[in-house]
Image (tube, rainbow, N blue to C red):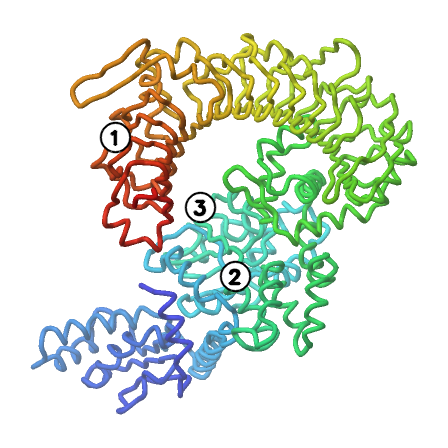
C-alpha cells in the first residue's frame, strides 16, 4: 500500500465524516465517501448486482479517507471472492456479460483487494450473535483511532510528518527501525492490522512484579512479551512459554509498534529484537533521547527532531500565551527576546502558559528572570536530561562545557583535559547522543539555557568547594583567606572592581587540582595592587590567562611545565621568569601571547617548547631580539610581531618553514627575514625596513601556492626594489641588475590570492601575465608605483570588489578587469575616462577620481 503521510494526514484532518460505518450489501445511494469505516457483507448473490460490484471499487478509492479500515463478512470460502470461483464466481461471470474488459478487470482487482482485508468468515462461527459482537467491538476500537484534532495545535508538526513520510517509506514492504515523534501513532494506526503504543506506564505495569529482578531475567522477558502480544492482538492473558513464540505469532501480521521514551536496551531487544519477527509492511518506531540505544540495536534510519526555527518558536510561544499565531501589539520585541533564550517546544509552551493574561511589566520581569537563569519551571525542564545522566564522568564533562568549553574546539578541550582521568571522547559522544550538546565543525556547542543550568549546579556548592569559580567576591574571599580546596578546578576573576588583592600564603597549595587560572578586566583601566606568595610553585596549571598582570615577572618558584596556553597581554612584565637564566621545559605549550607588554625586554628560552604553534608579541616595542632558537622540527604556525619597532633581525636559528601566518608589519628596524615557507598563507611586511629577501626567493620557479594575503606597503628602505629597472613590452623584457621583483611577483600570483597590497615599487612597469590567474582576488591595492603604465585587461575577476591604484601617475588606461567593483580609488593617476558600466552604477560604486575627470 502506498501512502503519502503529508497528503493523507491533511485530507483526513480537513474532512468531516457524516457517518461512522458504511455497510455494503446491495443498498442503493449509499454515502461511502461520508463514512469512516466500510463493512462489506458478501453473500452468494452479492456478485449478481453491478451496483454491488461497483461498491468495492469506490471503497478502494476512498480507502485513505476511510481510516484505511475495511471489514469483510463472508458467508462462504473467502477464496471464492478473491479468485471469483465457485457459486460466487459463476454468478460473477453472468454479471460480467456485455461488460467491457476494463470494467471486468477493475471488478476483479477490487474484489481481491477488499477480500484480503481484515475479515470474519461466518462458517467459522457457531454462534452468530458472538460473531456480531466481535465485529462491533473491533469496529468501535477502530473508530477510537480517529486522528486527533489536537495535533492542529502542535506548531510545526506537519513539517516533521512530511519529512518522516520519506523516511518511513510506507510504500515499501520492508524497512528498518527509525525514531519519530509521538503524534505519528494516531496518524499511522489506521493502516495496520495490529498496533501498540508502549510508554512508561505500560512498561511499569507490565514489569511491576519483576521490579527487583535482574533486568536480563528470562521469566521477566517472557512476561513482558506476553503483555505485548495480548495488547497488540487485542486478546486477554496470552501466555507464552519461550521467547521464540513472539516471532511465530506475529510474522504474518502487519503491525505498528511504537516505543516512546525508550531508556532500556532490554525492552528494545525483548519486544522488537529483529524486523523478521513481524509481517511484511510492519513499522517499528522508537522515540528516545539517547542515540546509543539505536546504534546498539543496528538502527540506521534516524529522524532527529531539531529545535524549531525562530518563526516556529515564536508561534509556539504565542499560541500558548495568546492562542494566536503572532504576538499582539506591544509585546513583539519581548516575544523576540524570549524566544532567543528559550527554544525547546516544551519550554516555550510552559512559559507561554505562565504568561497568559499577564501585563507587559510581568513579561519584562519574566525576561529578566530568564536572562539570569531564575525561572524555576524552565530550569526544571533543563535539569531533567542532566539528572538523567547515569555516569558521573558525563556529568563532570557537562559541567566543564557549561562553565568553560562551550563554543571551543573539541581538540583543544581534549588537550586541556588530557591528564584529568576523564574519558573525554566517550563523554562527548554520550552527551551528543542525549542532545545535551552538538559538535559542529570541530567545536562543541551547548544551548544557553543548559549552560546556565550547568553553572547553577556548580553554584550549589560553597565557594571553596566549587569546581568553577567565577564570582569576583567569592574568588577574592577564597584567595585572600586561603580557604580553597582540592575541588576547585578553575578560577575566572574579573578585577574591574578590585583595587588590591593579597593572596594567602597557602591559597594555591590547598587548590592542588587547579587547572585553569584566568584574570581579566571587563571594563575600566588601572593597576591592581597584587601580592602573590613566593611559594606559588603550582605545577598542574594548564592554562594561565592574566591580562594587565601588574608585576615585573612571575614568582621565582612558578612551575610552567604543564602549561598549554600562556596569555599575559598588556602586562607590566619585563621578563617571564625570575633568575638570570632559567630554562623551563615547556613540552605542552601550544600558544604564548605577551602582546602589548610594553616593558618586555627579554623573552624566555623556547628551545624546549617543542609543540609551540602560536607566538604573539604585538607592540612589544621594548623587545630588541627574539630567543636564538625555536625548536626543530619546527611546529610554529603563527608568528605575530606587529609594531615591535626595535627588533632588527630575526635570528637565523629560527626556522619559519612551517609558518602559515607571519605578521611583521610595523617592525620599522627589521632589515632581513629568514627563509619563509612556500606554504605561507598570510604574509604582512608593510612598514618594515627589509632590504633583501633570502636567496631562495630569487628562484624563478618559486611559487607560493597557498598565499591568500600579502601586504608590502610603505617599506622604509627602497633598497629592495631600487637595484633593478624592469620594463616589459609586448615582445621583449628589458632588465638591468637582478630580476627579483618580477620573479617575486610571478611567484605570488597564485589562484589562492584574495588580498594584495603593494606600494612604492618604482621599477614596476607592468604586472606579469599570471595576474589573470587571481580568480579569487577580492581586494587589490597598488599605490604610488610611479612607472606602472598598464594592467592586464580583457579579464573579469568576478570576486574583485575593491580597487585602489592611487598614485600610479603614468597609468592612463582604466584596467578593465572586473565588473563587480564597489570601491574604486584613482587619485593621482593619468586615467581620463572610465567604462560606461562604472558611470551607470555611480550610486552603487564609491569613486575617488583624479581632478581632471
N-term-proximal mark, 1 vs 3: 3
Q: Nearer the viewer, residue 342 or 782?
A: 782
Residue 790: mark in rendering: 1
Q: Which residue is mark 3?
A: 300
Label 3 CA crowd tier, 10 Å (few <14, some 14–19, many 20+)? few
Q: CA distance from mark 1 to mark 3?
A: 62 Å
Q: Is residue 469 visible?
A: no
Q: Quick check: 717 above or below 20?
A: above
* Distance between the alpha carbons at the discs numbered 3 and 2: 29 Å
Residue drawn at x 32%, y 53% is: 842
x then y, percent, for residue 375: 72, 62
Extreme-bottom residue of the structure: 28
Mark 2–mark 1 Cα distance, whole angstroms, equals 52 Å
Q: Horizontal placement of 25 versus 201: left or right?
A: left
Q: Is residue 756 above or below residue 150?
A: above
Callout 1: few (<14), some (14-19), or many (20+) C-alpha neighbours within 10 Å? some
Judged from this view, the residue extending furthest toward the left is 98
The residue located at (43%, 55%) in the rendering is 278
- Residue position for label 2: 310
Left of 519 or right of it: where is 345? left
For mark 1, give the secondary structure: loop
Closer to the camera in the image, 141 or 346? 346
Mark 3 secondary-structure assignment: loop
Between 690 and 188, the residue placed more toward the observer is: 690
**Closer to the observer: label 3 or label 2?**
2
- Relative depth, front residue between 177 and 359: 359
Q: Quadrant of residue 391?
A: top right
**Do tag 3 and tag 2 residues touch (Cβ < 8 Å)?**
no
Asked if marks 1 and 3 touch (Cβ < 8 Å), the reply is no
> From what the image shows, is residue 679 above or below residue 816?
above
Mark 2 falls on what kind of element? helix
Q: Residue at x 46, y 78 (%)?
A: 143
Amino acid at each position: 500500500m502506498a501512502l503519502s503521510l503529508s497528503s493523507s494526514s491533511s485530507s483526513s484532518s480537513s474532512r468531516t465524516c457524516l457517518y461512522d460505518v458504511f455497510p455494503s450489501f446491495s443498498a442503493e445511494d449509499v454515502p461511502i465517501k461520508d463514512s469512516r469505516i466500510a463493512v462489506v457483507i458478501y453473500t452468494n448473490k452479492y456478485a449478481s448486482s453491478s451496483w454491488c460490484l461497483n461498491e468495492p471499487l469506490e471503497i478502494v478509492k476512498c480507502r485513505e479517507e476511510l481510516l484505511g479500515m475495511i471489514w469483510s463478512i463472508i458467508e462462504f470460502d473467502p477464496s471464492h471472492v478473491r479468485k471469483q470461483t465457485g457459486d460466487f464466481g459463476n454468478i460473477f461471470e453472468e454479471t460480467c456479460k456485455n461488460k467491457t474488459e476494463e470494467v471486468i478487470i477493475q471488478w476483479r482487482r477490487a474484489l481481491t483487494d477488499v477480500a484480503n482485508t481484515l475479515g470474519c468468515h461466518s462458517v467459522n462461527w457457531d454462534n452468530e450473535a458472538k460473531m456480531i459482537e466481535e465485529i462491533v467491538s473491533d469496529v468501535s476500537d477502530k473508530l477510537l483511532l480517529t486522528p486527533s484534532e489536537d495535533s492542529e495545535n502542535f506548531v510545526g508538526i506537519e513539517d516533521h510528518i512530511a519529512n518522516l513520510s520519506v523516511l518511513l517509506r510506507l510504500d515499501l514492504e520492508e524497512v528498518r527501525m527509525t525514531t519519530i515523534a509521538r503524534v505519528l501513532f494516531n496518524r499511522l494506526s489506521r493502516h495496520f492490522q495490529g498496533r501498540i503504543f508502549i510508554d512508561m506506564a505500560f512498561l511499569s505495569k507490565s514489569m511491576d512484579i519483576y521490579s527487583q529482578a535482574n533486568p536480563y531475567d528470562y521469566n521477566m522477558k517472557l512476561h513482558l512479551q506476553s503483555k505485548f502480544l495480548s495488547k497488540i492482538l487485542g486478546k486477554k492473558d496470552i501466555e507464552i512459554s519461550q521467547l521464540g513464540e513472539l516471532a511465530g505469532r506475529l510474522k504474518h501480521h502487519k503491525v505498528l509498534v511504537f516505543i516512546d521514551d525508550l531508556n532500556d536496551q532490554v525492552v528494545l531487544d525483548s519486544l522488537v529484537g529483529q524486523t523478521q519477527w513481524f509481517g511484511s509492511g510492519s513499522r517499528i518506531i522508537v522515540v528516545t533521547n539517547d542515540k546509543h540505544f539505536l546504534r546498539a540495536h543496528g538502527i540506521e534510519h534516524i529522524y532527529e527532531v531539531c529545535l524549531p526555527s525562530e518563526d516556529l518558536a515564536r508561534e509556539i510561544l504565542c499560541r500558548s500565551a495568546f492562542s494566536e499565531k503572532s504576538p499582539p501589539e506591544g509585546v513583539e520585541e519581548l516575544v523576540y527576546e524570549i524566544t532567543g533564550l528559550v527554544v525547546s517546544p516544551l519550554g516555550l509552551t510552559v512559559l507561554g502558559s505562565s504568561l497568559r493574561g499577564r501585563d507587559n511589566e510581568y513579561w519584562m520581569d519574566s525576561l529578566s528572570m530568564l536572562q539570569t537563569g531564575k525561572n524555576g519551571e524552565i530550569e526544571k525542564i533543563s535539569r531533567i536530561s542532566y539528572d538523567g545522566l547515569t555516569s558521573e564522568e558525563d556529568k563532570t564533562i557537562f559541567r566543564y562545557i557549561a562553565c568553560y568549553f562551550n563554543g571551543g574546539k573539541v581538540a583543544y578541550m581534549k588537550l586541556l583535559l588530557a591528564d584529568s582521568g576523564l574519558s573525554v571522547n566517550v563523554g562527548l559522544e554520550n552527551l551528543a547522543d542525549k542532545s545535551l550538546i552538538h559538535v559542529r565543525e570541530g567545536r562543541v556547542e551547548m544551548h544557553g539555557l543548559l549552560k546556565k543550568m550547568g553553572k547553577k549546579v556548580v553554584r550549589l556548592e560553597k565557594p571553596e568547594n566549587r569546581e568553577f569559580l567565577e564570582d569576583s567576591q567569592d574568588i577574592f574571599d577564597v584567595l585572600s583567606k586561603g580557604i580553597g580546596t582540592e575541588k576547585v578546578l578553575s578560577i575566572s576573576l574579573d578585577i574591574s572592581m578590585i583595587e588590591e588583592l593579597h593572596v594567602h600564603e597557602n591559597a594555591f597549595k590547598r587548590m592542588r587540582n587547579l587547572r585553569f587560572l584566568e584574570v581579566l578586566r571587563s571594563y575600566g583601566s588601572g593597576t591592581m595592587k597584587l601580592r602573590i606568595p613566593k611559594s606559588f610553585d603550582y605545577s598542574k596549571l594548564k592554562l594561565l590567562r592574566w591580562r594587565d598582570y601588574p608585576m615585573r615577572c612571575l614568582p621565582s618558584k612558578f612551575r610552567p611545565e604543564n602549561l598549554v596556553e600562556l596569555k599575559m597581554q598588556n602586562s607590566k612584565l619585563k621578563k617571564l621568569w625570575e633568575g638570570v637564566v632559567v630554562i623551563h621545559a615547556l613540552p605542552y605549550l601550544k600558544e604564548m601571547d605577551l602582546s602589548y607588554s610594553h616593558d618586555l625586554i627579554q623573552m624566555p628560552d623556547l628551545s624546549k617548547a617543542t609543540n609551540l604553534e602560536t607566538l604573539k608579541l604585538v607592540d612589544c616595542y621594548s623587545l630588541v631580539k627574539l630567543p636564538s632558537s625555536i625548536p626543530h622540527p619546527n611546529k610554529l604556525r603563527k608568528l605575530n610581531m606587529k609594531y615591535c619597532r626595535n627588533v632588527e633581525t630575526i635570528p637565523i636559528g629560527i626556522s619559519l618553514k612551517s609558518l602559515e601566518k607571519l605578521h611583521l608589519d610595523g617592525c620599522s628596524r627589521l632589515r632581513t627575514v629568514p627563509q619563509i615557507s612556500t606554504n605561507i598563507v598570510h604574509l604582512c611586511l608593510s612598514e618594515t625596513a627589509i632590504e633583501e629577501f633570502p636567496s631562495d626567493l630569487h628562484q624563478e620557479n618559486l611559487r607560493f601556492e597557498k598565499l591568500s594575503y600579502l601586504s608590502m606597503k610603505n617599506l622604509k628602505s627602497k633598497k629592495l626594489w631600487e637595484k633593478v629597472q624592469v620594463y616589459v613590452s609586448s615582445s621583449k623584457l628589458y632588465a638591468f641588475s637582478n630580476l627579483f621583483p618580477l620573479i617575486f611577483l610571478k611567484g605570488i600570483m597564485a589562484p589562492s590570492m584574495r588580498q594584495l597590497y603593494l606600494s612604492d615599487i618604482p621599477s614596476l612597469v607592468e604586472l606579469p601575465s599570471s595576474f589573470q590567474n587571481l580568480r579569487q582576488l577580492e581586494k587589490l591595492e597598488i599605490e604610488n608605483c610611479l612607472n606602472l603604465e598598464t594592467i592586464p585587461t580583457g579579464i573579469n575577476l568576478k570576486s574583485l570588489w575593491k580597487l585602489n591604484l592611487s598614485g600610479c601617475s603614468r597609468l592612463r588606461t582604466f584596467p578593465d578587469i572586473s565588473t563587480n567593483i564597489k570601491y574604486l580609488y584613482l587619485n593621482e593617476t593619468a586615467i581620463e575616462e572610465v567604462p560606461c558600466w562604472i558611470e551607470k552604477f555611480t550610486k552603487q560604486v564609491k569613486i575617488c577620481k583624479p581632478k581632471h575627470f
